[in-house]
Image (cartoon, helix red, strand yellow):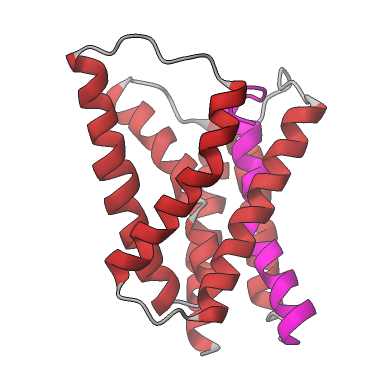
Amino acid sequence: AAYRLPGGLAAVLGAIQPLLVMVLAWAVDGRSPAQTTLWSAVAGIFGMAVLLLSPQTVFEPVGIAAALLGAACMAAGVWLTRRWKLDLPLLPLTGWQLVIGGLMLAPVAWLADAPLPALGRLEWAAYTYLSLAGALLAYALWFRGVTRLPTVAVASLGLLSPLTAVLLGWALLSQSITGTALLGLLIVLASVFAVQWTTARGK
């Protein structure tokens, strides 16, 4: 999805995760979501579309299918992690998740990807950062949140990832956030806060 779609469209499709978690909880566990939570999640998707989509957005079918499948896998992962409540400490749980995920991807990468070029110091530094900050630290914090928060609340926090990218672009690259984009950003933030509030009240 990241290769085939504009980043904004991929983020909008990924924003359906909270709704998918609600569908799983309703279909399997028989728990209907509160109306406020449901409409807050819908508002988050709408706000993401207002923030990130443009008339020039290209809708590529294979990329859209990949983005939807990725969102469904993430939603199922969050829901199952909370539902199964594996009796493992945080770091072993994170480690096993990453090891199993890597083993599943290894044959696909070996068959489909070109061999890696020779890596210099900069590339090794980048891989080290991705391994420690982008994988170990990020996923350890993520699974800690999954075990402590309602699943819908965790899924809605995924909306903050593209928002962070937008805000970093504004702060570091002097990219502007005005008009409808600013409105979309505010809608997404309000949606995330509303989902957190309603799920906390429903505990």
Q: Residue at x 17, y 15 (%)?
A: 121
77 to 158, vertically: above or below = below
Closer to the camera in the image, 20 or 132 = 132
Left or right side of 203 for 125: left
97 to 88, vertically: above or below = above
Name the spot of residue 104 as percent of width and height, x first.
Answer: 55, 45
Left or right side of 169 for 125: left
43 to 146, vertically: above or below = above
**Residue 198 visible (yes or no):** no
Q: Residue at x 65, y 50 (%)?
A: 71
Name the spot of residue 187 as percent of width and height, x first.
Answer: 56, 52
Query: How many dots with numbers?
Result: 0
Q: Residue at x 62, y 46 (%)?
A: 14
- The quarter of the picture where residue 68 lies is top right
Q: Main secondary structure of the magenta part?
A: helix
The answer to whether residue 11 is magenta is: yes
Q: Residue at x 32, y 60 (%)?
A: 140
The answer to whether residue 203 is magenta is: no
- The quarter of the picture where residue 29 lies is bottom right
Assign the N terminus to one quadrant of the image: top right
Segment tinted magenta in the rendering? 1-30
Name the spot of residue 192 as percent of width and height, x first.
Answer: 51, 61
**Residue 71 visible (yes or no):** yes
Residue furthest to the bottom in view is 203
Name the spot of residue 158 as percent of width and height, x first.
Answer: 50, 53
